[in-house]
Each structure stands twice: as structure tokens, then as C-alpha cells.
Amino acid sequence: MRAHQFMLTLAATTMLAGVASAQPIKVGLTGPYTGGSASMGVSMRDGAKLAVAEINKAGGVLGRPLLLVERDDEAKNEVGVQIAQELINKEQVVATLGFINTGVALASQRFYQEAEIPVLNNVATGSLITQQFLPPKEKANYVFRFAANDLIQSAMIVDEAITRRGFKAPAILADSTNYGQLGREDLERALGKKGVKPVAVEKFNIGDTDMTAQLLRAKEANADVVLTYGIGPELAQIANGMAKLGWKRPLIGSWTLSMATFIDNAGPNGDGASMPETFIQVPNTPKRKAFIEAYQAAYKVDRMPSPVSAAQGYDSVYVLAAAITQAKSTDGAKIRTALENLTAKVEGVVTNYDHPFTATDHESVTANMPVFGLVKGGRVVPAHDEDVAGANALRLKSK
């Protein structure tokens, strides 16, 4: 018996040694690891690194280890473009994981498209992202997404504010980035479908620290709820500005209200803010429990800076690994084809992936999947317990 166990251990050790010495499969990993969007970028990166470590420990992919080639795009379009060309031409990655910011994604993805290298977009939610390179204009589309796009989120925000909670006079505050302004347009369209017009539409810039003027105009217009679309700590200035004015109104916005930069900078003023989430740091499935505990142990934290980003980054690695395994190749076109026709079922943290993509659908998240989160006591909790209980705990893509 001991001899048998020794042989099994020896075989496993030999296999792992072989994987470690094999030529690695390079995968790009690009996002903002510094600056106002860093909590999203770092969480996405760390979720992806956790998945890679698990996969490599189990034997890698095609007998080879995955190797993440990390680059900080600083949430700047021009830096993202430079990184894309470096990862493609110098590092020769077989796929890239990212992006966080919609503007960076829209500026950078074309280089991967031209090189026929898949992009697994983990966090950026701009509605145009998976629509840039559609057939028949393009032979094939190499951009895939693991986040809830802005059409899904804007409809959810409006439904939560107008239908579920009964507000009638919304104000919109959106930042001046591509993300903020495209999201604002989506919000206005979603409101229009319900016959509602915002009483105020205000814009702010990245780096703004005082929202008094915008909030005063919303207050004078008798807004009863504030809807937001923004990507940075400026969101906290909205909550803090309302407190400063003594004008407290519910804050409902895109998923970025769950970021640590909002929660920590707003403090108690942020309590009650709510947003659509594909993942809340709640261990309501065995996979989620294991992921949360592994993340906490690996990075010595209790609360993930951006749980959504971490979960989507983690899941994207496992889906990519399944596609490379199915393709039996690291060729970009073959990986894309495998992603569009994935036969293996992948257990994830956000969801379980069963044919997540097709040739005409590169969105892994459908409108039935996200739930509303609520900032409470410095972290995000489910806004409505019934949305995450029982059969609703794990939501699958609508076919």
C-alpha cells in the first residue's frame, strides 16, 4: 500500500515537474493597477492569478503552465494601445484578459482583432465593446465579455428606481469618460421606455472633488433619486456632497458603486447606495465559498476591493483554459472557434458556463443574472435577500 502511494506521489510530482519545465502559454493581463480605477484592476488581476495558480497546480493546459503577462494601463487609452501592441508583437500572447475601462477597451481591442487574438473582456461594460467587429463586415469577432453590459445595467437601474421603489423624478450624474457618457445615454433611453424624463442631467470630470453645483441643480429640480454612471472615487464625492448639503436622496447607479474607492471614501455617507452586481462577496454556493476563502488567504484581506472584478477575472481564466484544451492549440482562430462552441461545462463563481458564447453572441451575462447589491457598514450585501436565496442563488445564462 505504501509502495502504491509512493508511486502515485512520484507520478504526480513528475507530472508537475514536467508542466513546470514546459514552455508556458502566455496570456496577457491588462488593467489599471494604479490610480482611481485600481481597486477594479487589482481585484481582476488577483482573481485571474488565483485561477492560474490553481490550474497550473492541477497540471496546466495541454501539459503546459499558463503564464500571465501583466501590464498596468493606468486607465489611459494611449497606454492601453501601447500595451496591446507590446503584448501581441513582443510577448506573443495567445489571448488577453482585461479591460477595466470602456475607453481603453475600445481604443485597444482593434489590435487584437487584427492579429486574430481573442480578448476576454472581464470588467469594461460599455455596450459597444462586443459590437466593434461584427460579421459580415469582419470575418470573425475576437472580443468576448464576462461582465454585465451597460444595456443590462441601465435597464436594471431604472427598473429598481422607477418600478420597484416608485421614484418619479430622477436626476442623472455621470462622469465625462466614454463609460460615463455612454452609460448616461443608456439610462436616458431606459427611462424613456418607462415614460420618465430626468429632471436634471449633470456631468463631472475625473479628479473632481466638489459636486456642489451639480447637486444643487438636481436639488432645485426636486429630484427624488440620484442615478449615477462613473468609474472612480468621484462617486464618493456625490454621496459626501449630498451629506454636506443636508440633502439626502437614494443613490442608485452602475456596479462601480461597489468599488472600495467609493465605499472607503464615502464612509457612512455611502450607506444605502445600490447597484447591479454579477457577484456579491457572499458564500452562498460551495464554489463561491471556496473562492472567497482562497482569495482572502492569498491576499491577506477580508473584503475584496472589487468582488465583481475578482470573480469575473477568475472565471475568465477557467473558460479560456477550457477553450484552449478543446482547441488542442494556442492558435488564436482555433481558440475563438472553441469559445464560440465550448462543449465543456465550466463551474464558475459568477455562474456555471454551459455554451456561454456563440458566433453571434459574445456576452456571457444575460439580463436575468445580475442582482442588486447594497452598501451597508463598509461592504456590499444583497439589497433584496430573495434575489440570492434558494434557486436564485446561482443564476444561469438565459438561452
Image: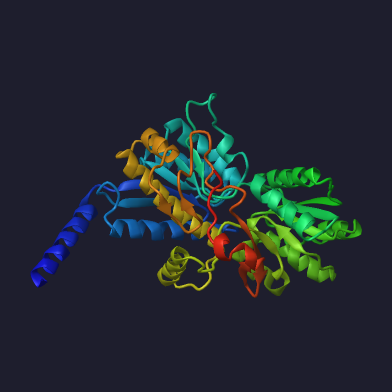
Q: Is residue 70 visible?
A: no
- Answer with the quarter of the image where residue 189 lies: top right
Above or below, 353 against 164 in this view is above
- State how the image is colored: rainbow
Nearer the observer, 128 or 93: 128
* Residue 399 percent location from the top left of the image: 54, 43
- 218 horizontally vs 48: left or right: right
Above or below, 109 against 390 in this view is above
* Residue 138 percent location from the top left of the image: 51, 26
Q: Is residue 312 visible?
A: yes
Residue farthest to the left, as pictured: 3
Residue farthest to the front, as pictured: 391
* Residue 76 percent location from the top left of the image: 57, 47
Residue at image point 81% right, 59% down: 166
Image quadrant for the N terminus?
bottom left
- Answer with the quarter of the image where residue 47 lies: bottom left
* Residue 77 percent location from the top left of the image: 57, 44
Residue at image point 74% right, 43% down: 185
- 388 horizontally vs 82: left or right: right
Question: How many numbered marks have been drawn onto this rendered protein structure?
Answer: 0
